[in-house]
Structures are given as C-alpha cells and as structure tokens.
Amino acid sequence: MKKIALLSAATAAAFVFAPAAANAAPPAQKLEVKLTSSTSGTKKKPKSVGITVSTGTTSQTDNPAKLKHTITYAKISMPKGIKLNYKSFPECKLPEDQVEVGGWCDENAPSSAVGNGTLEATVVDIEPLVKGTLTPYIGSNGRLIIRTKVDEIAVVDQPLIGKIGTASGGYTFDFNVPTSLQTPIEGADQQINDFKLNFKAKNAKKGKKKIGLVELVSCPKGGYVFKGEFRYKSGETVTTSTTVPCKQGK
C-alpha cells in the first residue's frame, strides 16, 4: 500500500525563509489560525470557541513538481489566555501496537473525535495533487491523534500522533513524522501543500459545569501569538509566528 506523509498542526498567513540547502532554494512555510470569536472570557467565565489551524509548505522553485521539502518534525506553541480541557473529554486509547491503524479510534472511540480537516500534498513524479481528509481525536496520555486518510493516487489510512505539553504558560503540540510517512514511495518524498484542522467548539460536562475543549480565559496584550517550528529532511529549520487580535470580554 502506498503511503503519503501527512503532518499536522496551526497559525494570519506568514512566510518565513530558512537558509538554503545545497542546490535548492529555501521553502516558505505558511501558518494560519482562526478563532470563532475574538472576544475573550475570563477565568471565572471562560468562553468556549472553535479553532482552525493550518499549515503548508511552498518550494521556492520554477519547477515545484520536482523540488520537495519533506517535514520530519513540527512543533506548534499556543499562547497564554487559551485553555485546553482535553483531559475532561473522551479519549481514544490507541494501543501502541496499533499505531499503524488509522481507523482504530473511529471504530472503538468515535466520541473522542473533536473536529475534521483536509489535506493536499505533492509526491515527486506524481502529477495530480494528492487530496484527503483529517480527523483529530483526543488520545490517552496527553496525545492528539490525527487520522490521515487518502483514497486515491497515494493511498493511506494512518494516524499521525502528537504529544500535548505545556510551556511558558501555554500549550505545545509536538509531532515527529515517521519515515514511512515522509517517503510514500521508495525514492519519492512528499511535500504538504496544505494541512488544515478544524477543532469544533465542543463542550463536555464536569460535575454540574459545562466546559469547552478550547476556552478563551484572557486577552493578552498584543493578542494571541502562535509560534511554529518546522524541520525538514534537508536539514533546514523554519520558525515562524502569527498574531490573532483579541479583545477582553467580561
């Protein structure tokens, strides 16, 4: 079965350039983030929102069909003022020996799904763009599991697993891309042109209270600053950030 590498995660469009690899122009990394509301709640009265995060790589070349930038690692950092309550939502306990099974969460823990998404990628020497769907799930042990499913050209149905952490008062998402997802065909790497995830404004009950998966609890001065770090198979690294304006509610 042919597999295509799929990556996740985040954040107003920005293009950042890294030093060029030998005989290749540097990639441009797009990151975007949108919230369903720009008005924050408070710690006592948080506001549940939906969030859309997307990324994509563009090769700086006159012949993009021949030059690819394959991502091996990505880290998305969320700012202070945004709270994640993923521990209060149903989990998909994907067994370690089932990490190659993309539909496991859908079949065994459908309530752990928290959104949807789409992807578009290019594989070396394959002319049509590869298009597919994404489904994010809350995993056990602080994991985000993204089912990546493509039915045509480069067929794949596998999970991309990221670790949810904290840093500087915010949250982080770390993804290591497996080698099998970097090179879907022997000798043919892939490039993610567009990878978009929509997390719904989903709510759960905690005792007598209703809490949101993603909540705005404050509006930092200067807005919400999202950061991204991307590493490529070529050895290049790109870091970028983007700011989402906000206003403090009551």
Image (cartoon, rainbow, N blue to C red):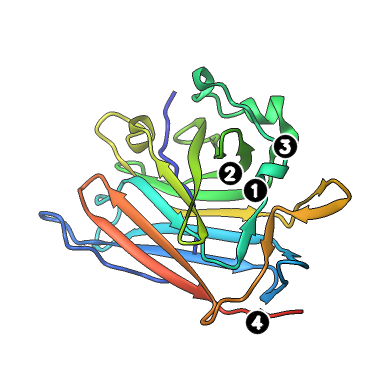
- Binning the other alpha carbons within 10 Å of mark 2 as few (below 14), some (14 to 19) or many (20 upward) gives many
Specify few, some or many for label 1: CA neighbours under 10 Å numbering under 14, 14-19, or 20 or more. Answer: some
Which is nearer the N-term, disc 1 or disc 4? 1
Q: CA distance from mark 1 to mark 3?
A: 16 Å
The residue shown at (36%, 66%) is 240
The residue to which callout 4 is attached is 247
Question: If you read the primary sequence from the N terminus, does the residue marked by circle 1 or circle 3 appear first?
Answer: 3
Q: Mark 2 or mark 1: which comes first in sequence?
A: 1
Q: Which tag, 3 or 4, sits closer to the chain's start?
A: 3
- Of 49 and 3, nearer the camera is 49
Please determine whether, in this image, residue 82 is positioned above or below residue 138: below
Q: CA distance from mark 2 to mark 4?
A: 31 Å
Which amino acid type is shown beneath numbered disc 3? Pro
Answer yes or no: is residue 192 visible: no
What distance separates the C-alpha of mark 2 from that of mark 1? 6 Å
What amino acid is found at the position of numbered circle 2 in the picture? Leu
Q: Tell which residue pokes out farthest to the left in this image.
A: 22
Look at mark 2 in the image and give the residue it sits on: 134
The residue positioned 29% from the left and 56% from the top of the image is 64
The residue singled out by tag 3 in the image is 90
Q: Is residue 217 visible?
A: yes
In the picture, measured across the screen, residue 137 lies left or right of residue 48, that is left
Residue 46 numbered tag: none
Query: Disc 3 and disc 2: Cα gap in Å?
Result: 19 Å
Residue at which label 1 appears: 116
What's under tag 1, amino acid-wise? Asn
- Amino acid at dot 4: Lys
Task: Tell me the crowding category of disc 3: few under 14, some 14 to 19, or many 20 or more residues within 10 angstroms, Cα based.
Answer: some
Q: Is the N terminus in the top left, top right, bottom left or bottom right quadrant? A: top left
| Disc 1 from disc 4: Cα separation | 27 Å
x, y (%) of residue 135? Answer: 62, 42
Identify the element where label 2 is drawn.
Answer: strand
